[in-house]
Amino acid sequence: MSGLQLKDITKSFGTVNVIKGVDLDVKSGEFVVFVGPSGCGKSTLLRMIAGLEDITSGSLEIGGERMNDVDPSKRGIAMVFQSYALYPHMTVRENMGFALRFAGVPKPEIEKQVLDAARILELEPLLDRKPKALSGGQRQRVAIGRAIVRHPKVFLFDEPLSNLDAELRVHMRIELAKLHRKLGATVIYVTHDQVEAMTLADKIVVLRGGIVEQVGAPLDLYDNPANLFVAGFIGSPKMNFLKGVIAGTEAGKALVRLPDFGDVTVPVSVKATGLATGTPVTFGIRPEHFDEAGSASIAVVVDILEHLGGETLVYARAVSGNSDLVTISASHREAGKSGETLTARFSPDKALLFDAEGKRIY
Amino acid sequence: MKLRSKLDAPVHKNLIYILPGLILYAAFVFGPIVSAVGISLTDWNGLGLPTWVGLQNYAGLFSDERFYLSLKNNAELMVFYCVLPLGLGIGLAAILWNMKPREQLMLRTMLFLPYIMPTAVLGIIWAWLYNPAFGPINQGLRLLGLGSLALPWLGDFTFVLPAVGLVATWYFFGFCMVIFMSGMQRLDPNLFDAARVDGATGLQTFRTVTLPLLLPEIRVVLLLTVIASIKSFDLIFTMTRGGPANATLVPNIYMYQLGFQLNRFGYAAAVAIIGAILIFTVNYAIHRLVRPADEGAN
């Protein structure tokens, strides 16, 4: 196994810049997830690593070797595609042994490698079937098996679970995590699903518009998002963003006035000094950080309730009716009724501040 | 019970709606087929009353050397009608597939053009191109100093069949190419990415992935070109009329000669029926032998 380095990687299609200078260091054995909305360039970046797209500028190293112009099959990578890309006319056995055939591996050795991989993925009874006769989850496992037999330095996954139903997705997510632990392989995994990113990754790379917004461990990104985009993207339901204005500062705290909520003032811990009174800011608080023991509060009118069993999501607006919907996660079922006025309490320590450009105010 | 629509009425009441179609089909398709079978069992000169001869015409065919010759010529023509267009079509489709859209569109249109022309017209044009005295092909050969190769193409026993066959190849290959290109569109592009990552070269990918997955298209192309080759008439009629000395005689030309020149309609009908049986048999064989490669689950 080995790591991977991207140095100022860019990609242009004609005059359109899709990847605008990505630097990234992936350590050996690390599970890295590229996450971002559609069109953010995450799949393109993965295809560039695979060698299926040319790199316009910058350098790509796998295991310390420059790979920019190396053929995909010689990069020491294996890729699992969103559509699985299993060869429909070949059996599972032939699909899994396909790459080894072209690598000049002798037949008995191919058979052994295929059987080893099939054992790991519990595919042995299916080896003589064709993809048409497999379920979605089985096809997915074959696609992974096809990658495993090549003993790659780096596994590349392009949204591998997005074609599965919700239940199977959760199951395969756990299987993938187990497999990663068993193989100890370096994995780069692309998804638009932040839950997959949070649950699988050692390191998440959040991409938007071809640039890296933030890189970090899942909980790091959750606790300390660098900007509004990451704050909104990581976490489900997403963070509430309320309009705020700096009303003053005192001893490591910024006093934030929330004009939509009756000008209530909340003291938020910040290290930054010199925040001018009257500066507009965005006040961020996660739905799950509303807490009855909190020292701060806002008054809201309940709009809609969603009972999920374990928690209840309350969608509410400011009493003035001017604010966007505020999402509150409550642990009890009697969180309120539609149309009722509530006092939503929270701890100001949990709140985050962002400046007018969306950057975090630390 | 209340009927939802008039069409829910019993079949015999609805028969009236399909009757016009049925009558046309019976008059112009089914009727002629049945009468052809009937005529093939008679001796008829087209004017007097046909004489019932049973299977005598068919028995005659089995000992008719000219008929065997026409079948042999037809089998040779299949190379030009089926094999060459299929090979050329699939090769060109693979080449064009990797081109930029604009160039692809231009070449695809150009290569498909022969197919939009009537084959009878093509036959006349090519007969002129092949003309030994003033035809551009021989003129070109003479210009290049290859005058010894400037043969009377359509009068040469050895070369007449390939000369006619090549026109059929030229007519069909663009059509085959278009069918194969539409087949390639159907394939998941990730398959080719996967093959690249798996280390297959372009040629290996073509052989091990593209070709087996194009079997449904190969089958369609084979069916259509085989039917066309067994039905071939207009091209040969306009170029050689089966000559010289029966070198391009095919069953349909033979049928024409028997029926419309020698007035042996019964015998000609037997040739036609054998041709139809041949088409059915070959098509059945293709259906059985060429199957989509992803079939057979276990």
Image (cartoon, coloured by chain):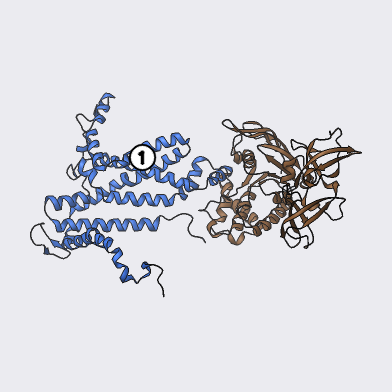
Chain colours: A brown, B blue
In the image: residue A141, left or right of residue A261? left
Task: Give the x, y percent position of residue B151.
Answer: 22, 33
Q: Amino acid at mark 1?
A: Phe
Residue with the most extreme right position: A251
Task: Give the x, y percent position of residue A277.
Answer: 84, 35
Kindly indicate the quadrant of the structure image that contains residue A74: top right
Task: Give the x, y percent position of residue A18.
Answer: 62, 35
Image mark 1: chain: B
Query: Can see residue A28?
Result: no
Q: Residue at x 72, y 37 (%)?
A: A24
- The residue wearing badge 1 is B112
In the image: residue B234, left or right of residue A7? left
Kindly indicate the quadrant of the structure image that contains residue A15: top right
Residue with the most extreme left position: B48
Rendered view: B75 above or below A137: above
Callout 1 secondary element? helix
